[in-house]
Every structure is written in C-alpha cells, then in structure tokens.
Image (cartoon, rainbow, N blue to C red):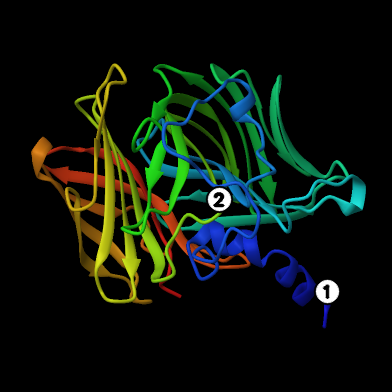
C-alpha cells in the first residue's frame, strides 16, 4: 500500500462525513450522540468535541471586486475521531483535513491539507479561538476573525466582522437529518462582513462581501439509506437569509430541512417537506448546477444558478462546492454544496 492509499484509509471517516457519503449512517460505536434540548456554552462550543466522531468548521463567502467581478471563497477544517478514547501525541485518535478554494467565473482553485492530531499540526482551541492546519488559520473572538490559506495556485488573507447574532438550526441547534431521528448539533454565524485580498495567478485582487460560518458535530448524522446532500445558504438582497438542505435517499425520496433567518437574527425552523429543491440544469458531469428552490410558507420561489458550473472539489473525496446567484421571488447570492454525484 502506498503512502497516498494509507492516508486515504486513515481519513476515510472524515472524508465520508465531510461529503455526506457512505459511513455517515454507521453506528456511533461508543461515541457521544446529540440529544434534544442542547445547552450550548460559549466560547467552549466553538472548540473541538473529541467525544463525538465527526465535526467541522465550514466558512464560505460571496465576494466582489471593485470591477464587479464575483468570486467565491471556502475555508473548511474537518475533524474525525478513530475512537472515542483520548490520547496524547501520536496516540491521539483525532484526524484532521482542511479544504480551501477560490472560485472565479472562469476557474476553480482548490487546496487540501491532511494532518494527525496530538502533534500540533492541526487543532481547534476555544479561548482564544484558533483553528488551524499547518499554516492555514482561522482565529479571533467570533466577533472579528482573521482567515488565511494558501495553495500552489492561490492564497488569501481575510478579515471578518460579525454584524448579527449566532443562528441555531433545527430545534435550538438540534438538527434532525432523517425520519429515523439521526441528528447533529448545528449552529451558524451567517452575518459576517468580509474583506481582504485574493492572490491569484493573474495578480492580487481586493474583494469585499459577506461570509457564512457553519459549525456542526455528531457521531451518526445520517441514516443508512442516505447517500449525499444538496445544501444551500442563501443571502437575499432584502436582508433575509435561508439555509436549506435536501438529503438524498436510496429509495429516490429526499429528507429536507430549512431555517429562515430575518435581518435581526430571528429564526423560523422548517421540518421535512417544507423546503422543495428541484434540479433544473446539469453540467457536463451530470451535476445539477441550476435549481428551483421553494419555501412556500415564506413565499420563496427562486432559481439558484452556479457562477462557475465546474466548481468541483478535486480533493480526497470529491464534491461540488461553489457560489451561486439567486433570482425569482427573491434576489441575492449564496453558496451550494452537492455530494453523492461522483
């Protein structure tokens, strides 16, 4: 077995979690599992939860340059535990994976980092908050954050400022993912203003925009019959926002969930069936890059279209992730993640 094969074997739990593929419906195997009526404690819950099997810190941003060109940006750190036990140094059972990307209308640049826990190469600490893998860093007090990443074809250095409260999805942060009751703890900061510099092959570009940071952890977030997901984070021009996902099932049905977010941070959760997401167009790889998204109770009937149809994450486990435009009953921008299509 070569080095790459060994790494992929070690990272199978985290890659499966991050992309919503097989493995997320397996038993929790002694790990903690989310329970209803969560009691979050900050800043501690911004940090890692090693007694849970899988976890992420996931930031996406819609950016604009001075000439009006749209860009997308991603910074993600995934944690996966091989076992519920703790350990130090090389005996620590934590595995880490980082994904970073910059999307332009013409190109999609991707970087990936893999690390073992316990040796200082990657970790997340809560106070002061710092998440890192090698030299990729997300740090600050959650009111303000600095974010950096680099890869052979790109780099970025961004400053983020929160302009609204944290948002808790599902039932006060307890996010149900299947009819059988699988769930995760899930909250977001969708109100970040972001500014900084993209370093691309054609030169440095100053950008501004808005960013959305997701926090989620669980040990068995999907059911055995669920194979992937379509996830939308939409920021409308009227100040409202919406998170919604569609979990694909082997029987051809889908499980859906959504959160409506007002400009001042008030939320309305929607359970299975309230959100409807219908593919409209596919790219050359048969990945749906155009969608009709409906939330009738809020009068939402929009078309979501990729800025770059080829925003494929060429990482250890591939998936599609990129910025989108929103037109129809509401207008705006957002991000779309799709798994289970390779």
Q: Looking at the picture, how far across and down is residue 180, in whole percent?
A: 35, 59
Q: Which mark is residue 223?
A: none
Q: Give the structural element (helix, strand or loop) at label 1.
A: helix
Q: Quadrant of the N terminus?
A: bottom right
The residue singled out by tag 2 in the image is 101
Taking the view exactly as shown, the residue that stands out farthest to the right is 89
Viewer can see residue 144: yes
Q: Looking at the picture, how far across and down is residue 153, in whole percent?
A: 64, 54
Mark 1 and mark 2 lie on one chain; the one further toward the N terminus is 1
State which quadrant residue 268 falls in.
top left
Judge left or right: residue 93 versus residue 57. Answer: right
Q: Give the structural element (helix, strand or loop) at label 2.
A: strand
Compute the Cα span from label 1 to label 2.
24 Å
The residue singled out by tag 1 in the image is 3
Q: Looking at the picture, how far across and down is residue 59, in whole percent?
A: 51, 39
Say which residue appears at 45% left-offset and 33% top-offset: 187
**Crowd rating for badge 1 (residues with CA inside 10 Å; few <14, some 14–19, many 20+):** few
Viewer-side label of 1, 2: 1
Say which residue appears at 38% left-offset and 34% top-offset: 67
Foreground residue among 152 and 282:
282
Q: Looking at the picture, how far across and down is residue 214, in whole percent?
A: 48, 38
Say which residue appears at 89% left-offset and 44% top-offset: 88
């Amino acid at each position: 077995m070569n080095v790459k094969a060994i790494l992929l074997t070690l990272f199978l739990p985290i890659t499966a979690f991050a992309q919503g593929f097989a493995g997320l419906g397996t038993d929790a195997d002694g790990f903690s599992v989310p329970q209803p009526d969560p009691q979050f404690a900050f800043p501690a819950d911004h940090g890692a939860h090693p007694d849970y099997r899988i976890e992420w810190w996931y930031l996406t941003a819609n950016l604009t340059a001075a000439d009006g060109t749209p860009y997308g940006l991603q910074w993600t750190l995934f944690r996966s535990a091989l076992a519920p036990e703790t350990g130090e140094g090389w005996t620590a059972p934590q595995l880490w994976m980082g994904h970073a990307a910059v999307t332009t209308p013409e190109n999609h640049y991707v970087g990936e980092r893999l690390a073992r826990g316990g040796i200082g190469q990657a970790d997340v600490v809560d106070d002061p908050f710092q998440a890192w893998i090698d030299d990729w860093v997300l740090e600050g007090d959650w009111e303000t954050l600095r974010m950096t990443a680099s890869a052979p074809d790109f780099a970025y250095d961004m400053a983020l400022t929160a302009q609204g409260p944290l948002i808790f999805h599902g039932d006060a942060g307890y996010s149900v993912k299947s009819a059988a009751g699988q769930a995760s703890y899930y909250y977001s900061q969708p109100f970040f203003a972001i500014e900084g510099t993209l370093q691309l092959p054609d030169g440095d570009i100053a950008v501004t925009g808005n960013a959305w940071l997701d926090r989620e952890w669980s040990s068995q977030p999907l059911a055995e019959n669920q194979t992937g997901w379509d996830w939308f984070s939409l920021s409308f021009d009227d100040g409202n926002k919406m998170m919604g996902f569609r979990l694909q099932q082997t029987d051809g049905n889908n499980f859906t969930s959504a959160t409506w977010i007002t400009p001042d941070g008030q939320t309305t959760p929607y359970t299975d069936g309230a959100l409807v997401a219908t593919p409209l167009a596919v790219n050359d790889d048969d990945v749906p890059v155009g969608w009709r998204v409906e939330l009738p109770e809020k009068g939402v009937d929009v078309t979501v279209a990729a800025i770059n149809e080829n925003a494929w994450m060429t990482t250890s486990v591939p998936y599609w992730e990129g910025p989108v435009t929103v037109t129809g009953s509401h207008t705006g921008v957002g991000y779309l993640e799709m798994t289970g299509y390779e």
